[in-house]
């Protein structure tokens, strides 16, 4: 039997499509148009969320490995001091979006969980090719570990988290931090992560449901990796699925939709973690595709997923 969208998700997507109008196909390799179209789409869907009033925001700055300034945005809930914290890598297919676009999303995570977040304004491809997004986020992780006492954080209770392209960056960040011998990461929380640059052949069962298309995927990975994309020399600091040694990585929480084009690479990544003895909680949600809960946050399945993520955050 063929896949079918969850009925609430399908209705919500139809309503959203009527509001924003059709999105014209974009040529493979057209980063600029994707930035314009998808950044605006994210702003529209995030604007429908209630922005919490119990979260304070402070901006800091650190330097990248090559000396570039990086924005660090610290979100904390008033009256909450759990001692844990999260370094967040925002989504965007390695090439678009920003901390500003994600502002309400991150504030809501903090409000609902009580756990403070540090969002890293990492540089994006193609201007910043691999491994720069990962090393930029590592600079943010180092900054948080170094300032943990001031911020009321226990250095051993810092997680890394990201969605989509940011989920891929978070996975690579966990690898990079292991190989650099720190800072210690308590958990990796990977939300429908973009992990494998070799995922370029369309699956007819998934293509009709894909808000992030195979053309988008080819464009994002090529922006990040250039002509190396798909070849034998790609580092796991660029594409986490290229990793061969999964030992001694942080425990993981991973969720993905069964109709997401990242499904198979995500399941394989979770399996490889488990085979290496890394405790991993994997959810494959039926009837949904990529970023389903962002598009239709009031759906029952979206609420269920949100509660799972909050539960994991609160166990840090």
Image (cartoon, rainbow, N blue to C red):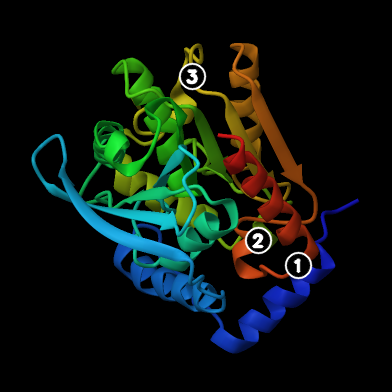
- Is 250 located above or below residue 2 in the figure? above
Query: In this rendering, would 60 be left or right of 239?
Result: left
For marks 1 and 3, the one nearer the N-term is 3
The quadrant where residue 170 appears:
top left
Q: Give residue 314's position: percent from left, percent from top.
A: 60, 42
Which residue in the rendered view is the most extreme toward the right? Answer: 1
| Circle 2 residues within 10 Å: few <14, some 14–19, many ≥20 | many
Residue 144 position, x and y percent, is 30, 38
Contact (Cβ within 8 Å) of mark 2 with mark 1: yes
Disc 3 element: loop
Q: Quadrant of the C terminus?
A: top right
The residue singled out by tag 2 in the image is: 292
The Cα atoms of the two marked residues, 2 and 1, are separated by: 9 Å
Q: Residues within 10 Å of mark 3 (few under 14, many from 20)?
A: many
Sequence-first tag of 2 and 1? 2
**Label 1 sits on residue:** 299
Does the image show residue 85?
yes
Q: Earlier in the sequence, mark 3 or mark 2?
A: 3
Would you identify the image quadrant in which residue 292 lies?
bottom right
Q: Nearer the viewer, mark 2 or mark 1?
A: 1
**Residue 101 spot, x, y in % from top left:** 39, 67
Does dot 1 land on a helix, a strand or a loop? loop
Disc number for residue 249 = 3
Measure the C-alpha gap from mark 3 to mark 2.
28 Å
Q: Secondary structure at mark 2?
A: helix
Q: Mark 1 touching mark 3, by CB under 8 A?
A: no
Residue 262 percent across, percent down from the top left? 59, 44
* 60 is higher (above) or lower (below) than 263: below
Figure check: 146 above or below 309? above
**Relative height, residue 92 to residue 203 (above, below):** below
């Amino acid at each position: 039997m063929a896949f079918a969208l969850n009925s609430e998700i399908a209705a919500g997507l139809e309503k959203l499509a009527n509001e924003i109008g059709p999105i014209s196909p974009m040529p493979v390799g057209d980063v600029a148009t994707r930035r314009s179209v998808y950044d605006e789409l994210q702003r529209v869907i995030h604007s429908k969320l209630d922005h919490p009033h119990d979260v304070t925001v402070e901006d800091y700055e650190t330097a990248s490995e090559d000396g570039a300034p990086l924005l660090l945005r610290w979100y904390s809930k008033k009256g909450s001091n759990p001692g844990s914290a999260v370094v967040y890598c925002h989504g965007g297919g390695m090439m678009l979006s920003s901390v500003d676009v994600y502002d309400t999303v991150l504030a809501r995570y903090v409000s609902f969980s009580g756990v403070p977040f540090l969002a890293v304004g990492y540089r994006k491809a193609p201007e910043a090719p691999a491994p720069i997004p990962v090393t930029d986020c590592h600079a943010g992780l180092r900054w948080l570990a170094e300032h943990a006492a001031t911020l009321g954080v226990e250095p051993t209770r810092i997680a890394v988290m990201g969605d989509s392209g940011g989920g891929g960056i978070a996975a690579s960040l966990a690898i990079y931090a292991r190989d650099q011998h720190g800072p210690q990461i308590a958990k990796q929380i990977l939300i429908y992560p973009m992990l494998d640059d070799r995922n370029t052949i369309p699956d007819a069962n998934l293509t009709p449901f894909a808000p992030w298309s195979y053309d988008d995927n080819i464009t994002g990975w090529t922006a990040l990796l250039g002509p190396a994309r798909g070849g034998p020399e790609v580092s796991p600091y660029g594409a986490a699925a290229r990793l061969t040694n999964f030992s001694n990585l942080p425990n993981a929480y991973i969720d993905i939709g069964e109709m997401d084009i990242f499904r198979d690479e995500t399941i394989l990544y979770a399996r490889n973690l488990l085979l290496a003895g890394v405790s991993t909680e994997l959810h494959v949600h039926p009837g949904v595709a990529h970023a389903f809960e962002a598009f239709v946050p009031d759906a029952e399945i979206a609420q269920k997923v949100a509660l799972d993520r909050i539960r994991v955050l609160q166990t840090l």
